[in-house]
Image: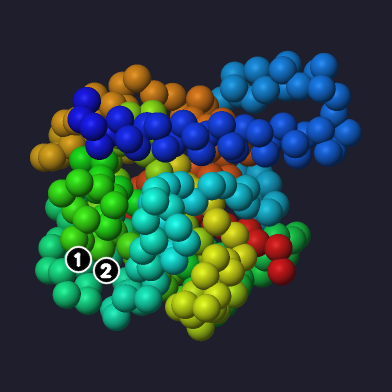
Amino acid sequence: MTPETDRIRELDRALREAAERRRMLRWLGAGGTAAALPAVLRAQGAAGAGPSAAGAGRCAPFPPETPGPFPADGTSASGRRHNALALAGAVRRDIRRSVGGPAGTAPGVPLRLRLELVEASASCAPLAGRAVYVWHCTRDGRYSLYSDGVTGENYLRGVQVSDAAGVVEFLTVFPGCYPGRWPHVHFEVYPSLATATDASAVGDYATVSQLALPAGACREVYGSASGYSASAGHLAGLALERDFAFADDRSGQQLAAVSGDQASGLVATLRVALSG
């Protein structure tokens, strides 16, 4: 294990503990008692993943999560402050290449990421005009702008605006897996593109969360595609239901559905329901 992966694990551990404390406070605020809390947390940790994003409860509000230690959204994280939203060319569909000067391209299995924004209501009405910022790690578990070896790159980060159907699509690569975390993608949703790219409105998003990638797709990519061998080893010791961000996702809202194959192209889809 490298010093970089050690650092990522420590940062994620701190975020996991903070998220657990928030879950405790939410539960106690809902009327729970401190004595019963350990049993509740054990039940959460033992719960398996629920149905896919197309299943029941898909129009309930999408669970918020920590943005993680490498958001590059203008806030201070990991002792550094980066703002990928302010980069020239940040609004783009293809996020495999760096923009604004750097010329690197992230290698990996092509993945089309499709998010559908809807109202958290019975109608599931589409939400048009919302700005979605996504970011994730490389095939070997590194984050552009932060991780050793890719601090000069800003790929695998970008913004799109939802269309009339509430849909945004990104062309990216299948994320890798690093120690301590299930394969995932981070995203923030802003009321508008103007808000997302306004340097004076840093952190003014409507929600921040993460999506999980299904085990079958991860094993297939990591076991056969070039450059993912380290990810295969890291995934072997993990379980989706024990990941700090996804352990309490009993309805499976955060689990994307992946279709297609490496030859014809992989597509990850997820419905994200938002209040207001």
Query: Which residue sits at x=86%, y=24%?
Result: 33
Residue 229 lies, in percent from the top left, at 16, 31
Q: Are marks 2 and 1 in contact (CB under 8 Å)?
A: yes
Residue 239 lies, in percent from the top left, at 44, 24
Query: Looking at the figure, which quarter contains the N terminus?
Result: top left
Query: Looking at the figure, which quarter contains the C terminus?
Result: bottom right
Residue nearest the viewer, comparing 95 with 179:
179
Of the two numbered discs 2 and 1 in the rendering, the one whose residue sits closer to the viewer: 1
- In what element is the residue under mark 1? loop
Q: Residues within 10 Å of mark 1 (few under 14, many from 20)?
A: some
Q: Which residue is mark 2?
A: 94
Residue nearest the viewer, comparing 113 with 266:
113
Query: Which residue sits at x=83%, y=39%?
Result: 29
Direction from residue 245 to residue 33 in the image, left or right: right
Note whether 163 is above or below 210 in the view shown: below
User: Is residue 50 visible to us here?
Assistant: no
The structure's colour scheme is rainbow
Query: Which residue sits at x=52%, y=78%?
Result: 200
Direction from residue 199 to residue 43 in the image, left or right: right
Direction from residue 149 to residue 40 in the image, left or right: right
The quarter of the displayed image where residue 110 is located? bottom left
Residues under labels 2 and 1: Cα distance? 7 Å
The circle on residue 97 is: 1
User: Is residue 274 visible to us here?
Assistant: yes
Note whether 102 is above or below 108 in the view shown: below
Q: Amino acid at mark 1?
A: Arg
The quarter of the displayed image where residue 228 is located? top left
